Amino acid sequence: MSTLITNIAELMTQDLEHRVLKDAAVVVEGERISWIGAAADAPAADDAVDAGGRAMLPGWVDSHSHLLFAGDRTAEFEARMAGEAYAAGGIAVTMNATRATSDFDLTRLAMGRVAEAVSQGTTYLETKTGYGLDVEHEARSARIASTIADQVTYLGAHLVPAGQDPEAYTDLVCGPMLAAVRPYVQWADVFCEEGAFNAEQSRRVLVACRDAGLGLRVHGNQLGEGPGVQLAVELGAASVDHVNYLAAQDVKALAASWSGWDPAVGTGERGTVATCLPACDLSTRQPLAPARELLDAGVQVALASNCNPGTSYTSSMAFCVTTAVLQMRLSVHEAVRAATYGGALALHKEAGRDADGERAVGSIAVGHRADLHLLNAPSATHLAYRPGMPLTYAVWRAGTRER
Ligand SMILES: N=CN[C@@H](CCC(=O)O)C(=O)O
Ligand SMILES: [Zn+2]
């Protein structure tokens, strides 16, 4: 079954050549893109959709979310808006609510959050454990997450639960807890920050998880300068996320990590993506991450929602893109790229092998997964020009029309 989507005013491919086509068309065959080009040259297909002169982008790739949780933290948010600082301790409130929730309800809540994200144009997403924080509940979160998200990250090292010895808890995270979650996860993450895990504990967790075959990610440099970025680069993490407080050496290390990568062909030695989380920065009243400086230094940057009940209770990637343009000084093309191709790069999904059906996401090209986002606007610029407007008009996820 093939579908021709034609009359696309602007097709922002986010492919390796950064092509933006005018008066374009796309053909979707099953779950893959089988053709793109000028509408006038489009081949026939079984079915046709008139895009009505709207703009099309790749679906958002949300490479950082925490969707496995119950409860909310309105009171903490109100206190923060009244001047209190964010601290890692709030995670325990969500841990208690999450542990007290049945499998059925936790699954239902997480599925609802995925549906919200998809309805706003997100077509590929990562989510994390991290609100279970004992062997039973981390394993349960990982298992449920594996049924609702495209990729799952183990975040047993999110917070040391009250009353536990930090070293003994780190041993648990590196040992029995890791073994219990291992069947369900592709990545491991650690909250490397004052009040959470120090450099030595973070290294211990990351090395144990790497030895168990997991890819690495780090929450780093969120609340102050710290060792997170350097550790992430040293251990070859795919991504370091937050990156609000960076010393000059941090930016240098991130840029150096990409020196063996050829962005024109998307091959070479991968570095560590700097993932910026602008909705979180605003909700915690932290300075926005220096995405402009990072891009200018040659770092690969992603934008993600960080949807969670403590620091960023939104899955709106459009909001992140809007903020990146209006306040972080990215161009519209750069911001959309960071929220699509950048997220895919951070999840090692930017390239696929069409021949064996391993589909790339985050860009529109032949053979890639047909993850498409049609805006109710003639150009992607409207994401920043009309902030906060409901611009998602249609969404295809792996070739299936979701909205
Ligand atoms: N910073 C660490 N973890 C989450 C917040 C967790 C919470 O406060 O519930 C984040 O990415 O912002
Ligand atoms: Zn996070």
Image: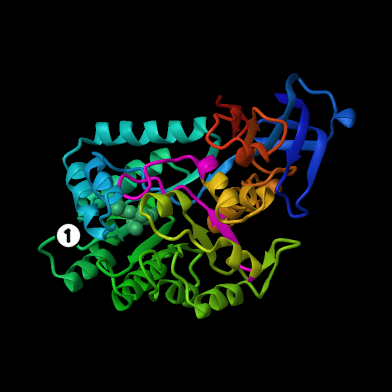
Q: Is residue 147 magenta?
A: no
Q: Could you tell me residue 48's position as x and y percent?
A: 75, 20
Q: Residue at x 39, y 44 (%)?
A: 146
Q: Can residue 142 be spotted in the picture?
A: yes
Which residue is identified by label 1? 161
Q: Is residue 301 magenta?
A: yes
Give the answer, above or below, for where 217 lies relative to 227. Answer: above
Q: Does the closest atom of ligand 1 sit within 8 Å of the Cβ of label 1?
A: no
Q: Residue at x 24, y 61 (%)?
A: 159
Q: Quadrant of the N terminus?
A: top right
Q: Can residue 360 be spotted in the picture?
A: no
Ligand 2 location (quadrant): bottom left
Label 1 sits on what residue type? Pro
Give the answer, above or below, for where 378 lies relative to 223. Answer: above
Dominant SS in magenta: loop
Give the answer, above or below, for where 300 lies relative to 343. Answer: below
What is the secondary structure assignment of the residue under circle 1? Answer: loop
Q: Could you tell me residue 139's position as x and y percent?
A: 27, 50
What's the magenta region? 297-319
Q: Is residue 102 left or right of residue 30?
A: left
Q: Could you tell me residue 259's position as x and y percent?
A: 65, 75
